[in-house]
Image (cartoon, rainbow, N blue to C red):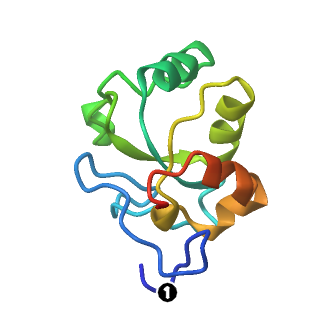
Amino acid sequence: MTHHKNVLGEPLEVCSLEPLTGFTRSGGCETGPQDLGSHTVCARMTREFLELSLARGNDLVTPQPEYGFPGLKPGDRWCLCAARWQEALEAGAAPRVALRATHERALEVVSLADLKSHALDLS
């Protein structure tokens, strides 16, 4: 993933290996032309976000082993679609994000200021 950049302009870091995340299930939020949803925001799941997502038609809780999806629980890190994170932000339920593991392409949808205000990895 070192050729991919994060929102800080640095090499993209791994988001999660357990559960294994990413559009390509590499553990990172890298993206490409086939990723129409732009799964580029590395976020730490919260109960509030998972409930909002479920209510809006995106069930991230129920395991789907046929797709290698374990189902998520609060505390898991996952590569979210940038538009879904923005939607959660507007609803007051945006989960915290790992900036160093969030792909720079997320900035096409989400502002850096909003991401920084929800950052897990800024001192």
Residue at 47 percent across and 74 percent down: it is: 12
One can see residue 37 in this view:
no
One can see residue 72 in this view:
yes
Give the left or right position of residue 11, taking residue 52 as reference. Answer: left
Q: Which residue lies furthest to the bottom in this view?
A: 3
Residue 103 at x, y = what percent?
57, 66
Q: Nearer the viewer, residue 60 or 88?
A: 88
The image quadrant of residue 60 is top left
Residue 94 at x, y = what percent?
59, 33
Residue 51 at x, y = what percent?
49, 16
Residue at 43 percent across and 84 percent down: it is: 2
Amino acid at dot 1: His
Give the left or right position of residue 47, taking residue 97 as reference. Answer: left
The image quadrant of residue 31 is bottom right
Circle 1 SS class:
loop
Crowdedness of circle 1 by 10 Å Cα count: few (<14), some, many (20+)?
few
Q: Name the residue under label 1.
A: 3
Residue at 31 percent across and 55 percent down: it is: 16
Taking 91 as reference, is 4 above or below it?
below
